[in-house]
Image (tube, coloured by chain):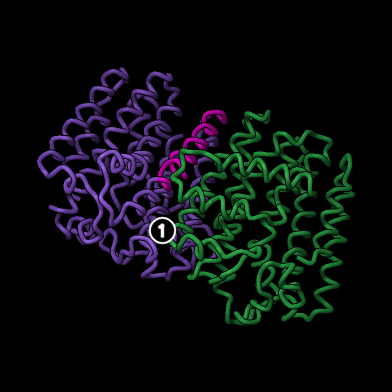
Chain colours: A purple, B green
Amino acid sequence: MKTKADLVGKRLADLIETPEIPETLRQAMAYSLLAGGKRLRPVLVLATLEAFGKSIDAGIPVACAVEMVHTYSLIHDDLPAMDNDDFRRGKPTNHKVYGEATAILAGDALLTYAFETVCSAEEAGAPSGRVLRIVRELASYAGPRGMVGGQSADMEGEDIPLTPEQLRYIHQHKTADLLVFCVRAGAILAGASERQLSLLTRYANNIGLAFQIQDDILDVTGDETKMGKPVGSDEKRKKSTYPALIGMEKSRSLLKQLIEEANLALVEAALEDNSILRALAAFIIERDY
Amino acid sequence: MKTKADLVGKRLADLIETPEIPETLRQAMAYSLLAGGKRLRPVLVLATLEAFGKSIDAGIPVACAVEMVHTYSLIHDDLPAMDNDDFRRGKPTNHKVYGEATAILAGDALLTYAFETVCSAEEAGAPSGRVLRIVRELASYAGPRGMVGGQSADMEGEDIPLTPEQLRYIHQHKTADLLVFCVRAGAILAGASERQLSLLTRYANNIGLAFQIQDDILDVTGDETKMGKPVGSDEKRKKSTYPALIGMEKSRSLLKQLIEEANLALVEAALEDNSILRALAAFIIERDY
C-alpha cells in the first residue's frame, strides 16, 4: 500500500508541476493534492489491476485522476458555505490559506484536470474504448447521481433526524460511489468479465459503507493527532451517523458483517490473487486515522 | 441559430429531468441551465458540423455538455466569494435562490455531468477515438490551463492595472478557450484534417477575443434590460478592460480586425459551406445583449 501510494504521490507532483497553470492557482491545487492522505482510492485502482495479474502502468493515470476528484471534493466540502472546516490532515484547509475564491477555483481545476488525466491512460497502453468507458463511469459515480448527489443529500440532512435508509443513501453516494468507481476502473482496464465487474462492485459497495461507518466511529472515539482534524464534529453539527442511530456496538457488528460480505464477493469473483483487496478491506475497519 | 438553440434547450431539459438526482440539487442545476441565454457555444459546435456538410446528431451531446460547462462557470463566478453578482439573464443568481452551498454543488454537478454527457456522442454514432479526443480537449480548454486558469488570472488582476498582454491572456483563457473547444469539437466529429483544425482554431480564437471585447463594450454602453444584468460592473470592480485600456474607438476597430482575421481563416479552411460560421462571427460584434 505504501509503495503504491508513494508512486501515485510522485506522479501527482509531476502532473501539477506545469508552468502553463497560473502560479497561485497551481499552488492552491498542489497544496491540497500533495498534502498526504491515505491515497486509498488510487491504491484500490492499482490493487484491482494486480488482482487480475495485470501491469499497473495504465492504472496510474486513472489512480491520479481519482485522487484529484477526491481532493476537489474535500476542498469544496471544507468551504465556509459547506462544512466550514479549518483543518484537514493536520494543516489549515485550502480556503484558510488561499482564500475562498481561489479554493473554489482550485477545486474546479482539479475536477476538470482529473478528466484530462484519466484520458492519458490511452498513452499508457489502454484501448480507447476502455478509457472512454472509464471516463463515463468517473463522471457518473462522481456526479449528481453519485458523489455530488450524496453531498447534497448529506447537507440537507443536517439538523434533521434521518431514517437508516436515508443515512444509507447518503453514505452510498457520498463515500461508497467513488470507491466503487476505483475498483470498477481497475477491473475495466484489466478486461474483467461483466460478472466479475458486478461482484467487484458488490465488494466495493460493502467496503465503501464500512469506510464511512468507521469514519463515523472515529469521529466519536478517534485521536485528533492521528486524524489530523478535530473529532466530535458530527455531533456538533447534529449529523445523523450510524453510532448515533443504532449505537456503537451495533455499528461495530455491522462493520464486520459488511467486510464479510465484501470478502465473499471477492472469493466469488475468482481473481488471480485477491490478497491485497482482502487486506484493504481489513485495513478499512482496523485503521485509526 | 434559433432552431439550433431550441433543439439544444429541449435536450438539456430532458437530460436534467432524471429522478436519480436529489430534488433540490436537480432544481438548482435546472434553474441556471434552462435560464435561456444565447446558447452560442452549442450553436458553434453544430454550425461547425454543418460547415463540413455533416449531420448534427453526434454533435448534440457535445453541444449540451459545453453549455453545462459554461453554466457551471457562471454559477461559480457569481458566488459571493467571486464576483458576488445578484442578477444573471434577468433572474436572481443561483446562490440567491438556493443558497451558497447548493450553488457550489450545482456547479460541481453540472461540470461532472458534462463529461458524462459528452461520452454519449458515442451512442449518437461517433467513433470512440474521436469522442475520447473531445473529452480530453474539453478538459484541457475548460481546466487550469484553460478557462479556470483565465478566471484565476482575472480575479488576481482586479484592482491592479494590467498590460495589454496580461489582458489578452485573461480574455484568451477566460472566454476564447471554450469557444475554441466548440469549433474544434465540431471539426473533430466531422473528421477534419489537422490543417483545417488549426485554421478553425484561429477562427475561434479571433471570434473569442472579439466576443470578450464586445462584452467589455456592452458593459459600458449596453442596455440593462436587454442584457439582463447591471452594466458598469467592470468599472465598479476596477477591472482592466479594452475600452479602459485602449479607448472605445480603438476597441471597436480591433473588433473589426479580429472578425476579418476570423473570416480569412474560414476561407483558407476550404469548408463545404462557411456561411453560418461567418454569420456567427458577424453576430458576435453586432449583438446588443
x and y percent of residue A172 in the render?
33, 39
Q: Please check the rendered image and state whether residue A129 is part of the magenta-colored stretch, yes or no.
A: yes
x and y percent of residue A126 in the render?
51, 30
Position of A42 relative to A127 (above/below) = below
* Total numbered circles: 1
x and y percent of residue B204 in the render?
76, 54
* Secondary structure predominantly adopted by residues drawn in magenta: helix
Task: Tell me the quadrant of the picture where the C terminus of chain B can be found.
Answer: bottom right
**Disc 1 residue type (three-letter):** His
Please name the residue that numbered disc 1 is placed on.
Answer: A76
Q: In this view, does A256 lie to the left or right of B147?
A: left
Observer-nearest of A198 and A68: A198
Observer-nearest of A140 and A130: A140
The numbered mark 1 sits on a residue in which chain?
A
Q: Please check the rendered image and state whether residue B238 is part of the magenta-colored stretch, yes or no.
A: no
Residue appearing at x 28%, y 43% in the figure: A167
